[in-house]
Amino acid sequence: MAILVTGGAGYIGSHTVLALLERGEDVVVLDNLVNASEESLHRVAQLTGKTAAFYPGDIRDSECLARVFGEHQITSVIHFAGLKAVGESVQKPLEYYQNNVAGTLVLLEAMRQAGVHQFIFSSSATVYGEHSPVPYQESMPIGGTTSPYGTSKWMVEQVLQDFAKADPLFSIIALRYFNPVGAHESGLMGEDPGGVPNNLLPYIAQVAIGQREQLSVFGGDYPTKDGTGVRDYIHVMDVAQGHLAAMDHLKQIAGFKAYNLGSGIGYSVLEMVQAFEKASGVTIAYQILPRRAGDLPAFWADAELAKQELGWQVQRGLDVMMRDTWNWQRKNPRGYRS
Ligand code: NAD
Ligand code: WQD
């Protein structure tokens, strides 16, 4: 009996693999390493004393999937694999639809053939699009996405709903993450963006370590508490725990359900800078620039449904997110290449 984790060498996937192994689950990882290093899985093994079986393969490769399902008694699949850079998705839409949408179809077909019916999908707050009022609730209509990346997540959710309706054996949960940040408390695992980070906290951490000169704050004139963008940041280990709670819930439901994984609290960019400075003791140089294309002023989760139905809520506040990010960055200035 094992859980297949696609994209399990990546940022959120590797932290979830660690949480699954710590709970005593057997884990099989499939990852093509397009945005990850196998070193993350070595660190998981170092921390847990347990090893996940690893297949360096692609979710679009049906023969590879058949081999994985043939060689292990898989009972459920947690599907992280995909491309995630919003800006890049605008430049390379076909790659995003191929990996994120077509790849998921190949995976679902392989599951159907193997008789594996429990599925958790990495969705995103981005599916609420640009017109939803905050806080975002799961009952709101989704769509109005502003990038091929966001649209790919929206499309997969539509596919999953139709698929679950057509085949009542399937139980499917889409987890809509807000803004995952932070690292494992050991400082041995964390987020390892290649090149210039797209996301706020990895960028701040690289300024703190001296790899980047200053943070560009995108927009100081939003209608928010201090004019900068507001988001719902969530510790990656809380995201990992959310998957364990969703796994348990899958066994009790049929069909498709979506849950927000967020804290319900919004912090501005400048609040994030201040909190990081407090945790690290390092001053973060920044300049305020014009808004970044496609950014929304402010959004955060209504976190009640996951609390009520999954019995899950965040356990780690902003101080812990910052402490763990700094700990990881300091110990691994070049990420997993250190
Ligand atoms: P990540 O890039 O670190 O992890 C994705 C993993 O999937 C990588 O290890 C990559 O090598 C692998 N992968 C990509 N395409 C593949 C393919 N075709 N076959 C096999 N493996 C493939 O990203 P992450 O931050 O860990 O995100 C995990 C999932 O969560 C993604 O689906 C992402 O879209 C979603 N998500 C992330 C965030 C975030 O801010 N990090 C927010 C919402 C949703
Ligand atoms: C957060 C805030 C920026 C960088 C993206 C995806 C979303 C999800 C998470 C996957 C915003 C500001 C950022 C910088 C800045 N991923 N910022 N300077 O844009 O909320 O979400 O990642 O699903 O789909 O869109 O996250 O970390 O990029 O930005 O001022 O150098 O920080 O404008 O207000 P975002 P982010």
Image: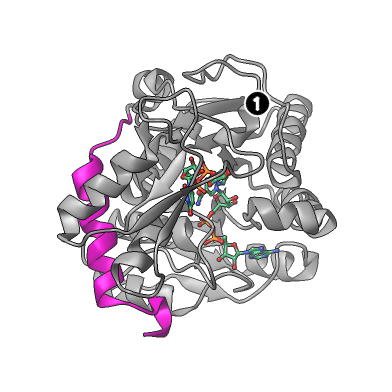
Position above or below: 93 against 153: below
Mark 1 = which residue? 130
Q: Position of residue 37 (x, y in %)?
A: 50, 77
Observer-nearest residue: 96 or 329? 329
User: What is the magenta range?
Assistant: 312-338
Q: Where does the C terminus fall, quadrant-wise?
A: bottom left
Is 287 left, or right, of 87 in this rendering?
A: left
Residue 252 forms part of the magenta stretch? no
Q: Is residue 194 above or below residue 21?
A: below
Which amino acid, by three-letter code, is at mark 1?
Glu
Residue displayed at 37% across by 68% down: 206
For the point 24% across and 58% down, which residue is it?
324
Magenta-span inclusion, residue 319: yes
Q: Where, by quadrant of the figure, is residue 124 drawn?
A: top right
Give the x, y percent position of residue 68.
64, 67
In the picture, measured across the screen, residue 6 lies left or right of residue 318, that is: right
Name the side, left or right, on which 129 lies relative to 316: right
Residue 19 appears in view: yes
Secondary structure of the residue carrying tag 1 is: loop
